[in-house]
């Protein structure tokens, strides 16, 4: 068992991390994954794609998510803290939010090509209602979550 939801990061700090990483073209690779009731979508940073194009696509997806779900909680995942894998956190978030209508879980991984300590992994758990976000945080943040694999 692992504590999956433990390191909250503010929206401004999250967007600043993304901006700083993508302004250093050539140093990162990555992907963005969106999971919702409607299905799953993954955007990969293809080899020929410029950082600006990847950032524009990320921005558009996050804006679309904001239009549907305006109440976010963002968790930062890092290896140096021995956090659970980003996919494990994403899967747990999606599983635990099935009782709420219209939740979207977005995972953004920007992986540094030479230094894994510079990796940026963010899990956005996005709710339609503020009470859903507050309820999720009270129930699951900093608590042991059983793996149901």
Image (cartoon, rainbow, N blue to C red):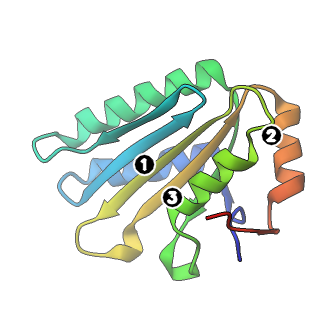
The residue at the point 28 percent across, 43 percent down is 44
Q: Secondary structure at mark 3?
A: helix
Distance of label 3 from label 1 (alpha carbons): 19 Å
**In the displayed structure, would residue 4 be above or below residue 26?**
below
Q: Give the quarter of the figure containing the C terminus.
A: bottom right
**Residue ID for mark 3:** 87
From the image, state whether disc 3 or disc 1 is nearer to you. Answer: 3
**In the displayed structure, would residue 86 be above or below residue 71?**
below
**Residue ID for mark 1:** 18
Q: In this orientation, which residue lies closer to the viewer: 24 or 114? A: 114
Distance of label 1 from label 2 (alpha carbons): 23 Å
Residue 10 seen in render: no
Which sits earlier in the primary sequence, circle 3 or circle 2?
3
**In the displayed structure, would residue 124 be above or below residue 71?**
below
- Where is residue 73 shown, x and y percent of the image? 70, 45
Q: Residue furthest top?
A: 67
- Where is residue 103 shown, x and y percent of the image? 68, 32
Which sits earlier in the primary sequence, circle 3 or circle 1?
1
Residue 14 seen in render: yes
- Where is residue 12 shown, x and y percent of the image? 59, 44
From the image, state whether disc 1 or disc 2 is nearer to you. Answer: 2
Residue 72 located left or right of residue 88: right
Q: Give the quarter of the figure containing the N terminus.
A: bottom right
Residue 53 located left or right of residue 69: left
From the image, state whether disc 3 or disc 2 is nearer to you. Answer: 3
Q: Residues within 10 Å of mark 3 (few under 14, many from 20)?
A: few
The residue at the point 39 percent across, 66 percent down is 119
Q: Secondary structure at mark 2?
A: helix
Which sits earlier in the primary sequence, circle 1 or circle 2?
1
* Circles 3, 2 touching at the beta carbon (< 8 Å): no
**Residue ID for mark 2:** 133
């Amino acid at each position: 068992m692992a504590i999956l939801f433990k390191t909250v990061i503010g929206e401004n700090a999250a967007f600043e991390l993304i901006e700083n990483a993508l302004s250093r073209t050539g140093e990162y690779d990555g992907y963005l994954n969106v999971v919702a009731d409607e299905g799953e979508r993954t955007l990969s940073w293809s080899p020929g794609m410029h950082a600006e194009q990847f950032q524009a696509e990320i921005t558009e997806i996050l804006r679309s998510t904001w239009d549907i779900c305006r109440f976010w909680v963002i968790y930062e995942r890092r290896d140096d803290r021995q956090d659970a894998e980003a996919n494990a956190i994403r899967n747990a978030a999606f599983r635990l939010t099935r009782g709420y209508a219209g939740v979207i879980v977005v995972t953004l991984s920007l992986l540094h090509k030479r230094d894994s300590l510079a990796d940026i992994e963010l899990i956005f758990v996005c709710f339609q209602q503020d009470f859903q976000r507050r309820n999720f945080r009270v129930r699951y943040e900093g608590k042991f979550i059983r793996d149901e694999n």
